[in-house]
Image: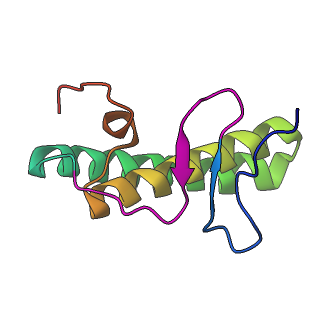
Amino acid sequence: MPYPVLFTLSGLSRGLLPGAGWAYHWGMKLECNIDAKGKAVRLIWGILTLAGGLLVLFLWARPVGGWLAWTVAVVLIASGVFGIFEARTGWCVVRAMGIKTRM
């Protein structure tokens, strides 16, 4: 039995995730689910993580090289950018999944 299509080339169609049993729409709007304190914490976390990723990039990954150094740098930078995104939009991915957080 083939799995339903998750997305088309436009990325905006509906489909079922294999084995998940629920529909996901790529174009759904992000609703604010954190308060000002949560936004501040995520912004600080994002900035510090992004700065750490840039430090790792310029002090370890570029001079030394290797897959581990580049992987650590990319993960830190992506985490920092995502934290800043969460702070700017007021949306937390963990809360969106229904998990209660302290902030």
The answer to whether 96 is drawn above or below residue 87 in the figure is above
- Residue found at the far bottom of this picture: 10
**What residue is at 87 percent from the left and 38 percent from the top?**
2
Residue 5 locus on image (x, y percent):
76, 52
Residue 43 locus on image (x, y percent):
29, 53
Q: Quadrant of the C terminus?
A: top left
Asked whether, in this view, residue 87 is left or right of residue 26, the answer is: left
Q: Main secondary structure of the magenta part?
A: loop
* Depth order, front residue of 64/80: 80
**What residue is at 57 percent from the left and 45 percent from the top?**
76
The quadrant in which residue 68 appears is top right
* Depth order, front residue of 19/97: 19
Region of the chain picked out in magenta, as a range: 17-32
**What residue is at 63 percent from the left and 64 percent from the top?**
13
* Depth order, front residue of 6/83: 6
**What residue is at 18 percent from the left and 43 percent from the top?**
38
The answer to whether 10 is drawn above or below residue 7 in the figure is below
Q: Quadrant of the N terminus?
A: top right
Residue 83 locus on image (x, y percent):
40, 50
Counting the numbered discs, the total is 0
Magenta span has 28? yes
The colouring scheme, among rainbow, by chain, secondary structure or one colour, is rainbow
Asked whether, in this view, residue 17 is left or right of residue 100, the answer is: right
